[in-house]
Amino acid sequence: MPDNGAPDQAGYRVQLEIYEGPLDLLLRLIERDEMDITQVSLARVTDQYLAYLGALQQARVDDLAEFLVIAAKLILIKSRVLLPRPDALGEQEEDVGEDLVERLKEYRRFKQVAGLLREREEQGLRSYARLVPAARPEAALPPGGGDAALLMEAMLQILRERREKPVVDRVMPPLRVTISEKIAHIDALLAERSRIVFRDLLRACASRLEIVVSFLAMLEMIKQVRVRVEQDGLFGEITIVPVAPGEAEPAPAEENHEPL
Amino acid sequence: MDPERLDQLVEALLFVAEGPIRAADLGKVLGVEEAEALAALLRLQVACANRGIRVQHERGRFQFVSAPEAAPYVEALLGLDLSTKLSVAALETLAIIAYRQPITRAEVSAIRGVDSDGVVRTLVARGLIGELGRLEQAGRPILYGTTDEFLQYFGLDDVTRLPALNGTEAARDTSGSDAGKAG
């Protein structure tokens, strides 16, 4: 960058280098002149900094404010370095220069590490963890009953198999099924069979809505500890069996289900 | 348990583990104190220093990774294309976070002298840094730290392998510190 004179503005724009911010710019100005980071060297590069700032103002940049804040500090530092001043000046003012020197030194240290990281990146010195997980023997089945996730999977399976049937007659009122009706239905089935295959229960349903209600009914019964579910193998059939009366504390029944 | 046997078992478990694993978890499986398991892991790390696989240590968790020197061949084998490079801003930000973690975005911006929100977001998206928790002060700003992917990207087996800043300040592994309230 020229020290003095006024190069034409177009020339500036072409030569405008990209800096990572005001500290980056300051650091490079100081390093270019092979100076240590001190208040004196900051004062010496102030004019160059301001010249760059002038060019920056013409190129529109987002973080101009940050450059301006540093510019103000530089001008203050320079004025103090150049002008003889009475000792009476407050200590607070002293800090502006020292503070900037310290910040710049700290920033330089991180830039050095960034350079080292860049080197490692360029050398391609990377490590790789195993991308494919280790082979895993088939997971042991959970002892006893299944859980909600199992049921959900079976449910989704059924829903995939059965698309909603088109409504032929729009005048006919839609079937209404409530959760309590379904619970009664499951109870009745369990009374005669003692166990129900979950899939069969869902197959008997006339609509997706009914499937959903059946599913909710069963969840409710599990919650009330009236039934539990078992699965005899991974992806095996899920069966619903009643819980014997003494087997568990019944949870309080909830009767606040709105009909769907 | 005699140390030789412990070393073997730790190596075996690290091999089959699907991801980074804690010394405490190894200790539980092997029926030894966490400190013993940790000592065995660190011995393994030293033993692997010249091997094709290395032991990576990040925030108290260990895993096997390939040696950085093998990277070009690993990439050829796996068909990886790694031509995109990090920007200067990204590298600066990573350097600051590696030494000052856990750290907030505002603190990173203050050190760099420019707004760093965008670059921090990008680094999170790339998985090179992650959230460690939140600082218990006004606004509860997010605290960031480097990840195991950061270590892998630069082929470091431990963040403390980075040279000390100014000869004194080492890069930080925050495993011991409590970075605000997690989550």
Image (spheres, coloured by chain):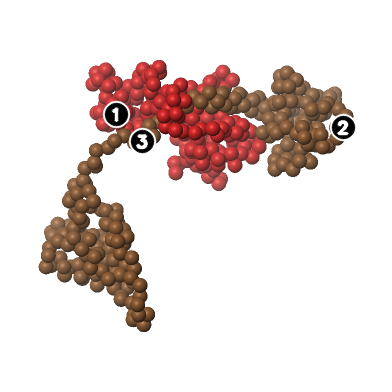
B141 with respect to A108 (left or right)? left
Rendered-image quadrant of the N terminus of chain B: top left
Mark 2 belongs to which subunit? A
- Residue occupying the point 22% across, 48% down: A234
Does the image show residue A185? Answer: yes
Residue sitting nearer the eye, A155 or B90: A155
Identify the residue position indicated by label 2 in the image.
Answer: A6
Marked residue chain, label 1? B
Q: Quadrant of residue B121?
A: top right
Residue at horizontal 77%, vertical 32%? Answer: A15
Task: Give the letter of the chain under mark 3.
Answer: A
Image coordinates for residue A143, horizontal then vertical, percent: 19, 47
Q: Residue at x 40, y 26 (%)?
A: B66
How far apart marks 2 and 3 lie (CA) works out to: 62 Å
Q: Where is residue A202 drawn, in percent x and y?
A: 24, 64
Return the disc, 2 or 3, that comes first in the chain's sequence.
Answer: 2
Q: Nearer the viewer, mark 2 or mark 3?
A: 3
Mark toward the viewer: 2 or 1: 2
- Reading the image, the residue beneath label 3 is A132
Question: Viewed as shown, does residue B126 lie left or right of A70?
Answer: left
Q: Which chain is brown?
A: A
- Image quarter where the C terminus of chain B lies is top left
- Residue wearing tag 1: B13
Chain in red (letter)? B
